[in-house]
Structure formats: C-alpha cells, structure tokens
Amino acid sequence: MNSKLRVRRLGIDTYRENVVYMQKGCRLCKSQGFDVLSKIEVRFGRRSILATLNIIENGMLHEGELGLSNVAFRRLGAPEGATVMLSHPNPLTSTEFVRRKLDGIALTRGQIFEIVKDIAAYRYSNIELTAFVVACAKRNLSEREIVDLTEAMVANGEKIDWGLPMVLDKHCIGGIPGNRTTMVVVPIVAAYGLPIPKTSSRAITSPSGTADTMEAVTNVRLSLPEMKKLVMEENACIAWGGAISLAPADDIIISVERPLSLDSEGQMIASILSKKKAAGSTHVLLDIPIGPTAKVKNRSDARRLKKLLESVGRKIGLKVLVVYTDGRQPVGRGIGPVLEAVDVLKVLKNDPSAWAELRDLREKSLMLAGTLLEFSGRVAKGQGVGIAARLLEGGQAYEKFMAIARKQGPLKVLTRAGHSRLIRSPRGGRVVSIHNQKMAKVARLAGAPTDPRAGVYLQAKVGDFVKKGTPLFRIDAEHEDELHFALNYVAANDTIVEVRA
Amino acid sequence: MNSKLRVRRLGIDTYRENVVYMQKGCRLCKSQGFDVLSKIEVRFGRRSILATLNIIENGMLHEGELGLSNVAFRRLGAPEGATVMLSHPNPLTSTEFVRRKLDGIALTRGQIFEIVKDIAAYRYSNIELTAFVVACAKRNLSEREIVDLTEAMVANGEKIDWGLPMVLDKHCIGGIPGNRTTMVVVPIVAAYGLPIPKTSSRAITSPSGTADTMEAVTNVRLSLPEMKKLVMEENACIAWGGAISLAPADDIIISVERPLSLDSEGQMIASILSKKKAAGSTHVLLDIPIGPTAKVKNRSDARRLKKLLESVGRKIGLKVLVVYTDGRQPVGRGIGPVLEAVDVLKVLKNDPSAWAELRDLREKSLMLAGTLLEFSGRVAKGQGVGIAARLLEGGQAYEKFMAIARKQGPLKVLTRAGHSRLIRSPRGGRVVSIHNQKMAKVARLAGAPTDPRAGVYLQAKVGDFVKKGTPLFRIDAEHEDELHFALNYVAANDTIVEVRA
C-alpha cells in the first residue's frame, strides 16, 4: 500500500494553518479519497501533523511529491526530500465538544483541556477554530469555563519560573496608540527594588508594540537565561516574549478571531491572564482604557470586565488589580517605534516636555508605577505616586532604564525618517477627539512598525485650540509610496482628528 | 500610487475560497499594510473579487506579479498578464448582521438577503462563512428566517421556467447508499404523462449521485434548451444540474458546513427547497429515510423536519409532500455508478431479481412513483401504486427510460471492474445491520464515483441468514491500490455488516 510521498517545502506562507499541496489527479488522492480541503495526517517517524489539502495543477510538484506550507514544514520537522506517510486522521473527539458547546451545553474542565491541547498541537483547521471561537464568543463562557480555558492555555505551553516570591507585571488591554507607559513604569519599579521582568509582544495590528518600541533603543531578543541574569542584576528586563512559547493556543485562536472582529469576553480574559501566568507573574496591574474608540466603550462594560479579571485571576493564583484610564485619544505624541521611544526617553530624562506636551504619558506612567508599588504591599497606600515621582525626577529611573537597555544590547541612535508631511486643521476651533484606530491605521500605512522610524507625531491633542492651518499631526515615512498611502487615507477620512468650531 | 500588479494563474485549487498570492516583502504588501490572511479587493476593469492573501517566498512569483488560485482567476475573468488594481475592501456590512445573529438577535429579511448576496458573490472568507454557518446551525433559525434564507438563495442564482402549470419532482435528503429510485420513478411518472424534469447532483461525499449513476448509462451534460426539448417530447430528463447555477450560495455554505459535521436544520431545509424552487418544480415529494446510520435517526426528528419542510414549502409557493422510508441499510445491491445502474435497469426490465434481491429498490420506487401520481391530483388516492406497477410491469417505464437515455446521448455498455474481492462473514447468524456511512466509505475507497465501475455489491442484506464464510459483499475496483485501501478499511472496521449469532 503506497501512501508515501517525498516532502517539499513550497515556501507558501499560510499564516498558522497547516496546508499540504498535492498534484491534481495524483493516484494517492484518488485512492485515499483525499479531496480539496480534506484534513490529512502526515507522519514523519514519530512526528505527525494534521493539514488541510489544496490541489496543485501547475506542474510545480512532481509525481510522488507532497508540498508543504511553511508552518506545516516547520512543524513536521522532516528534511526536504524525506519520505512521509499520509493517512486519514482519526476524527478529533474534541471537535464534538465544540459542537456540544454550540448547542448551549457548558464545557467541562476536561473537555476544555482536550480542545486546547488539540489547538496547541495545530490539529484544528481554520474552519474548526472559527467554530470554537464563535462557540465561546460574546459572553458565552461562564466564569468557571474562563478559569478552565485560562489554565488549559497555560498548561499547553512553556512556563517561566523566576524563582522569586513576588513578580510584578503590568499590562494594558490595548487599543490606544502611543501608550508606552511600560518603558517608564518598569525602570521606576525596578529602581525601587522590586522585580518586574517584562516579556512584551510585538505589534500585530497596531503601529508598535512595547517590544517594537524597546527595539528602537536596544536589542530585545533575549534568551530565558539572559532575562534571568538581568532580573537578578537589575530587577527587570524589557524583552520580546515571542522567543518563549507562552500559551501558544492563544495566538492560534487570535489568528481567526481577529478577522471576525468578534468580541469575546472569555477569550480576552483567558488570553491576558494565561500569558501573565505562564510568564511567571504573581501581581498583575491591568490598565483598561475607556473611550468611544477604545476597546472598552463605557464604565459599565469596564466594571464587568474588571470583576471577571480579578475573580478569574484569584482562581488561577494570580493577584490582579484593575485600573481604568482615559482612552479618549492616543497617549503621548509619537506613534511608531522610534517616535514613541523618543517620547519615553524625554519623560525618563525629565525633559521640559514631560510637564508640557508629554504630560499625559508622564502622569499615566507615574499613576501606574505608584499603584504597582502599593499593590506590592511594600509601599503604604497613598505613598506610591509620590515615591514613583521622586525616582523619576531624581534620575534613578533613567539610570535604571539605561542600565537595562545597555545590558540587553548595544544602544541605537534615534533619527528621523526620510519623508514627512504635516496635516493641518481645515478650520479653527477646539480638538474634540482623536480616533484611536484611525490614527493607528495612518501610522501603519506610513510604514510602522516595519520601518521603525515611520509613524505619526501628534501636534495637537484633545482640548487644544487650533487655527485654520495649524498642524494637527505629522506623518513620517521612509518612502514616498508609504507617505502617499497614509496621505490618501487621511484625505478619505475627515474624522481622524475632529476640530469643532 | 502604484497598487497595480500583473495577474498570474498559479494553478492552485483552493476549492471555493478566493486566494491571492504575493511575493514576500513585496513593496505593495508593506505599504498597503497587507498581511497574511488579509482580505484584498482585486479589480480588473469593472469586475472585482475579494480574496484572502497568502504570502509566497519561493521565487514562483516575480516582482510586480499577483498569483491567483484557480477559482479567483476564473471569477475575476482577467487574462493572464493583465494589470489589476489592489485595494483594501470596504468592510462588508452583512458580516455585522452575522455578529448580531451570534448575539441571539433574529435576522431581518433584508439582512438575510444581503448576507446571501455577499456569499453568492464570493465575498465571504471561509472564516466568515463558518461564523454564519454556526450562527444558523442546530435549530437557531426561526421558520420565518428559514423562509427568508430559502428565498434569498433562490433570488441569488439562476431559475428555470419550464412554462408548465405543474412540474413534479422528487428528492431524498440523502445518506443512504444505492438509493437510486429516481431512475425508476421518473420514467414511470413520465410514462403516465406527467412532466418530471430531473436536475440531479453528482456525488460530493457519497459513492454516487443520481447524475453519476445516470452518466454510467448515457450523457447527462445537457444545456437548458436540450432539457426543455426532452421534457416537451418525453415529459422528463435525468440531467446533471450543475450546468445551471441554481441557488449557488447553498453550495458555498455547504463547503464549510461539511467539514464541521454540524447539523443545521434551517440550512438543510433552505438548501433542499431553494434548489427545487430554482429548478422550477411545483410539486416536490421528499423522501426522509429513518435509521440509526441515516441522517434522521428517529420518528420525532423526522416529524419535526416534515412539518418545517411542508410549512416553509407552502410559504415559498412550493407544494411539498414528505414520506418516511426505511433508512436502516442501503437500498438495492450495487453501490457506485455502474453497479447502481445495473440494479436500476434490472428493475425497469422486470428481471426476476426485481422480485428477489432488488425487491426493496423496486417496492420503494413504486411507492414513491405512486405517491407522486396521487400528489399530482391526477390519480385518485389509493390508485397510485397500482398504476405505477402496471406502467413498470407493462414495459412502458423501461421504454420511457430508454427513450430519454437515447435522446440524452449515446448509450454506454455496462461492464465489470478489473479487480474484485469478496468479503465473507466471520460467523454464522443473521445480518442485523449494514452501516450506511461506512459502506459508502468502502465504495469510495474502492474508487467510486471517479472510477464508475468501482464500488460495492451487497451479497446479503438485513434479515438474511448467513453461514461462516458466506459472502457479505463484494468490492470492485479498477486498480489493486484502491482495492487494498478499501480492504484495509474493512479490516479495521468490524461493524460495517453486523452478523449476530
């Protein structure tokens, strides 16, 4: 029985979905009854993957060859040309649980663990993943199910053990461009003497993640031993978390959740808390910005979320404290890796702008740092912000930041992008809103975060009075093309910065 | 602003999903912010498609080229090398309705029409389609929503007008191998003088569809004018319906529904009735087989389905009559295009086997034909089966079938496949069940319907007494390989034919 084929990496990026390619009319397809979109099990020695079949008829594959998409090739781990076995996979029992959940029947802890295990092993097709995401969407998960989902995500991935009794962390639920408080908060807390090892993410749909902004200053690709050494010596690191596979099922789920723009309370909570738990944190301060173009639109939604986050946190052994912040506009002035790094350094260096145009970034950072200090139990209530302000103004926070940055790698010089254009107010009046998502999109179109110097610099913020022709923001780009993409988007969207007469 | 690329057909079959392929690191991807799995609008002149992006890094594409999957290429209709424009598509408003339905809010008629229109125009990604399927799955659609969905599917496709006051039709909800009653019923009804133009489907996951079995005898690829001429002359045709695009949204929805094995009452009803309505039928007899391995497992589910089918039918102007039939095992003996055609011809020719091993096929066909005759109102209650039997036994049905078959194309000679193997009973006893899906799978693995002569011939049926070693069924295949695939499956599944001592 000949169900063997030779492996070829076709160099096709299908994101997270395993896809295998077979030649049209190939004997094996016919005899095995493999159809387009069939799920196929591919075995190499003792490793195996499940993949979705696409059929190729362009002669790219020869008889006896099996093409693999990039992720499928990497996950199978077979060298090019190796012989693999193909078969019909046993049906996943866990997809039956998904169907049951769609019927409105709550999932048991065991069922949730089995589902997450299959997802983390890349055994779900995008269609099956979507069914799971939809089954859990909105408010379809009970608190008990969210706890189980969070713990299942932690269990199916790596975990960091810092060997410390207390590990502080902070996290923003996202959606606010320029919101780089982490890079101010971490050195303040570390300068006070408390451990706060940050494993940050890169931008996925935003113009910059904390890892991208930190990378504008220094290296962020640290191994776990390097992080541990840094935390031992400086109490902190600001590294990219992607080198360690923390709660990987979460990333897989997000890959289909995002294109659906589906709100999913349970998944969001499980996503945030599983990453923090896996990262070895014990005390997590969560920042929920509230605003019309933020993720959370009103106080009542924020309260519900806060209650669930704190309660689920408690049940998985994580101390969670939630604060509400102003999410009505971007924080600071720069949006994009380098532009944000410049803002952060000005605040850390006590540049006069930290009390002027960067006041919101400075004050938010101090509030978060102070809250975190008090949350640790090492600083009395009401003392946190004052202590944080002294560490910042006294230069200890800056020194700490520079010590961390130097130990992570060689420092980089921050420069301006090659092309800039000012966007001016079409009328005189007061700035009443800056649209978070739309402004993020302008920065992305300008090239951020791929081009670290690209992005947006806000020249006016909510509450400012402007005249007709006063610059509202500046677009920075490396190439004329990108600049024009951003300018075209701005021309087509007149509500990015709203000025009311 | 350079968002133009030259089109290349890459020859990749992605089933029904439009996929475009761009070279990794291509300027356009970067500047437009196109990511893997982004939805992209591709325009050629006044035509445009939405497609999902995959990234290629193997040098298969040159700078300035855009690769298209087969369906995307066909739907866009641009010649190879033509210049196309790329852009971010406007978000579909109809996916917002899907999100609302997921929230439990009923869809309005207008919303359902907009969703189906976008689906029929291939504007939904597989992820979005899955969300819609799940939102409508199980019993999530009200009767009113099912009516709207059915009518929306009819509206977004072609329709056949036979120019006749009454057009009879029959349909089985499926799941029973060998169930080729249509090829007996149609000539009986046509011989009586009533119009019954059949547009049948090919097998998708079964070993043969009516169109496949009829194709074993003659041509089934008829144009609409050819069908109309045949119906005028002979009252009937038995043609493949795929040449006319009847309710195409249904096929698209089924493409993601099937891999989920999700029961969806509303979608099933809309699927059946929209095809019949679009095909111009006025009186539809629906056959619901009931059995443990049939689609409908028990009387109570069957009654619910019957009530909905008849009621939705009435509301869309279709007379629907439902009959329950025995779904505990395959009908007839042969499973696979040629093997089934042989059974059908024996029944039509009044071969002695029609009263012996093919009795179930003959009796079911007569019951359905008789019911249809009475349903037309032209035959009194209680007379139908008698009239049908006389038309069959008198040879008029056979003559009618041959007249239709000859006019559809040259007749084919039915022969046996090259390889056969008997599967014998491991013990003496009584045959208590034959598993519909598993037996279908054996026939498919043997090569049906791709190899028309491949399949299964049942040597024993439920109720038969067998000795140890008595043949239970025969597997026919064209190639040794396929025969072995089927044999291996049989060896691993001991409950395909259950014999109890």
Image (cartoon, coloured by chain):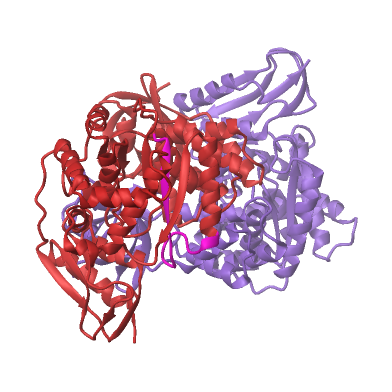
Chain colours: A purple, B red
Q: Is residue B53 visible?
A: yes
Write the start and end of the magenta stretch as one range: B281-300
* Residue B479 placement: quadrant: bottom left
Residue positioned 32% across, 64% down in the render: B330
Drawn side of residue B432 relative to residue A156, left or right: left
- Dividing the picture into quadrants, the one containing residue B356 is bottom left
Is residue A490 left or right of B105 when viewed as pictured?
left
Q: Is residue A261 left or right of residue B154?
A: right
Q: How many marks?
A: 0
Nearer to us in this view, B471 or B129: B471
Quarter of the picture holding the C terminus of chain B? bottom left
Q: Do we see residue A411 in this rendering?
A: no
Q: Is the residue B471 above or below the residue A95 in the image?
A: below
Q: Nearer the viewer, residue A10 or A66?
A: A66
Front in this rendered view, residue B159 or B388: B388
Residue A197 part of the magenta-drawn span: no
Q: Is residue B296 magenta?
A: yes
Give the answer, above or below, for where B103 lies relative to A408.
above
Question: Residue B6: percent from the left, percent from the top?
Answer: 30, 27
Q: Position of residue A313 (x, y in %)?
A: 73, 64
A444 and A292: which is toward the camera: A292
Coordinates of residue A467 in the picture (x, y in percent): 75, 14
Quadrant holding the N terminus of chain B: top left
Q: Residue at x 68, y 73 (%)?
A: A164
Residue at left offset 25%, top offset 41%: B191
Is B402 above or below relative to A422? below
Residue A125, position in %: x, y? 43, 56
Q: Residue at x 21, y 59 (%)?
A: B447
